[in-house]
Amino acid sequence: MDAQLAREFILAVPPELSADEQFKTAVDWAKKELVTSGMVAEISLHHTKSGKNPHVHILCTMRKIDGEKFSVKKSREWNDVGILAKQRESWANAVNAALEKAGRNERVDHRSLKDRGIDRVPEPKIGVAASAMKRRGVLDDPERHQLVRRVKLLNAVRPMMKAIKERGEIYQVGAGKAWWQKSISFMARIREQADKVVRKSWWNRLDTRQQRNGKDGPQMGM
């Protein structure tokens, strides 16, 4: 069966806002962007245990309200990519307005890294399944977690690689003029960045195991 039975929106809400502010922002946006178009929307606010990923699920009907009934045909025009792009922008505007009203300085941007002129590889989502496997101890290091670390490491060394591609070298005071001296300096910087990523991943794993076992785990010297 491949019929589209419902339309779902998953919206990230700022953790800087209170739960009431998060929910009100989502409700006001749904009324303006979805309900006025004829959709019926159900809104649920979800808070993860870590508190780092609050989000809203909005489940919508596929048919418009026609009088006291649903329309006979589904509204296929709601699937238009152009509408989705406008909805992403309007949600960003709604979130920023809520942050400003709450006296917060944080802001969000719906545009891609490329459109914003940011030279960085987007970090993939770890996802619920991978997080659950790690939390339950099914896998200590799921593939999605490994992928995120690889992307973070790639972004860490990306400025250095770009400098080499554009100028053939990385200028550093006191790094030496010989190619082998610059290579040693370059590799040292890569190692430093990689070490930061690995250490952060290690402490995250250690915290997870301690929470799961309810006791202190092995200590790592700094």
Image (cartoon, rainbow, N blue to C red):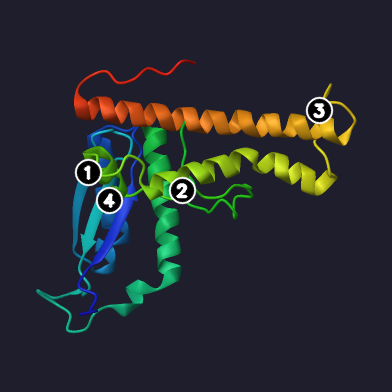
Residues at marks 4 and 3, CA–CA distance in whole angstroms? 44 Å
Residues at marks 1 and 2, CA–CA distance in whole angstroms? 26 Å
Left or right, residue 75 beside residue 121: left
Residues at marks 4 and 2, CA–CA distance in whole angstroms? 14 Å
The answer to which of 113 and 181 lies nearer the viewer is 181
The mark that comes first in sequence, 4 or 2, is 4
Give the numbered dot on residue 46: 1
Q: Which residue is mark 4?
A: 129
Q: Secondary structure at mark 4?
A: helix
The mark that comes first in sequence, 2 or 3, is 2
Q: Quadrant of residue 62?
A: bottom left
Residues at marks 1 and 4, CA–CA distance in whole angstroms? 16 Å
Residue at 21% x, 84% y is 73
Asked whether residue 187 appears in the rendered view, the answer is: yes
| Residue type, mark 4 in image | Ala
Q: Are marks 4 and 2 in contact (CB under 8 Å)?
A: no
